[in-house]
Image (spheres, rainbow, N blue to C red):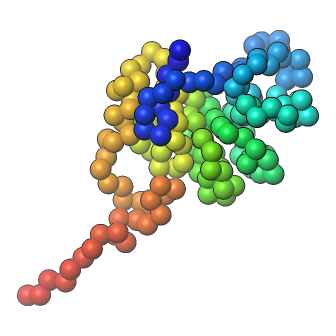
């Protein structure tokens, strides 16, 4: 069974990631039973069919906007964000918007080309689950969440910047 990092622990991944193969359409793709993450296009095309299921999550491509789910974000237990390649950072904004603007409190999962070097920064913007690349060590990737002991900037996980958190004392001369 595939493993993911969720809430800083390595756990079994119970979710099936549905991707459209060449020639398949959102309207006709077979949706498996059990917990499944469907592309946003499938969710939009087959909402009436999928709304009855409690085990459906959605995943967003890096060129899609979280705001497209604004009226239904709370119905999903998982929303995943795809990173098609390591250097594509648009998913960071998607996760931040899911948390800060849309108030999503469920699992936000990074999928695709997810590497250890990204995890610390991904958690800062709201990701709490990571499906790392299968050709890399998930145990090593887990260590990426603690690469830094402190962060300077404010973000989703730390609302105040370091200069507001650090206690300063005046020195007299």
With 51 as the anchor, is 138 left or right in this view?
A: left
Residue at 38% x, 20% y: name it.
137
With 89 as the anchor, is 170 left or right in this view?
A: left
Task: Find residue 63 and report its image quarter.
Answer: top right
Task: Find residue 56 and report its image quarter.
Answer: top right
Q: Is residue 16 above or below residue 44?
A: above
Location of the C terminus (image quadrant): bottom left
Q: Is residue 43 above or below residue 154?
A: above
With 144 as the anchor, is 110 left or right in this view?
A: right
Residue at 29% x, 69% y: name it.
166
- Expressed as whole percent of the image width and height from the top left, the position of residue 87 reads 51, 33
- Expressed as whole percent of the image width and height from the top left, the position of residue 153 reads 42, 60
- Expressed as whole percent of the image width and height from the top left, the position of residue 85 reads 55, 27
Q: In the rendered image, is residue 143 in sight? A: yes
- Expressed as whole percent of the image width and height from the top left, the position of residue 89 reads 55, 40
Q: Which residue, as the protein is rendered here, is positioned at the far left?
A: 173
Which one is in front, 18 or 90? 18
Residue at 47% x, 55% y: name it.
157
Residue at 54% x, 43% y: name it.
127
Which one is in front, 102 or 78? 78
Q: In the rendered image, is residue 112 in sight? A: no
Q: How many marks?
A: 0
């Amino acid at each position: 069974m595939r493993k993911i990092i969720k809430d800083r622990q390595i756990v079994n991944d119970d979710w099936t990631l549905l991707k459209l193969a060449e020639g398949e359409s959102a309207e006709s793709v077979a949706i498996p039973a059990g917990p499944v993450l469907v592309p946003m296009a499938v969710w939009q095309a087959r909402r009436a069919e999928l709304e009855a299921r409690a085990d459906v999550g959605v995943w967003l491509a890096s060129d899609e906007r979280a705001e497209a789910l604004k009226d239904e974000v709370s119905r999903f237990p998982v929303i995943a964000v795809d990173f098609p390649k390591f250097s594509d950072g648009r998913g960071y904004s998607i996760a931040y918007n899911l948390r800060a603007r849309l108030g999503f409190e469920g699992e936000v999962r990074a999928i695709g080309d997810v590497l250890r070097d990204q995890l610390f920064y991904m958690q800062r913007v709201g990701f709490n689950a990571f499906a790392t690349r299968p050709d890399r060590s998930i145990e090593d990737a887990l260590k990426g969440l603690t690469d830094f002991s402190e962060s300077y900037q404010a973000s989703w996980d730390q609302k105040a910047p370091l200069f507001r958190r650090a206690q300063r004392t005046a020195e007299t001369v």
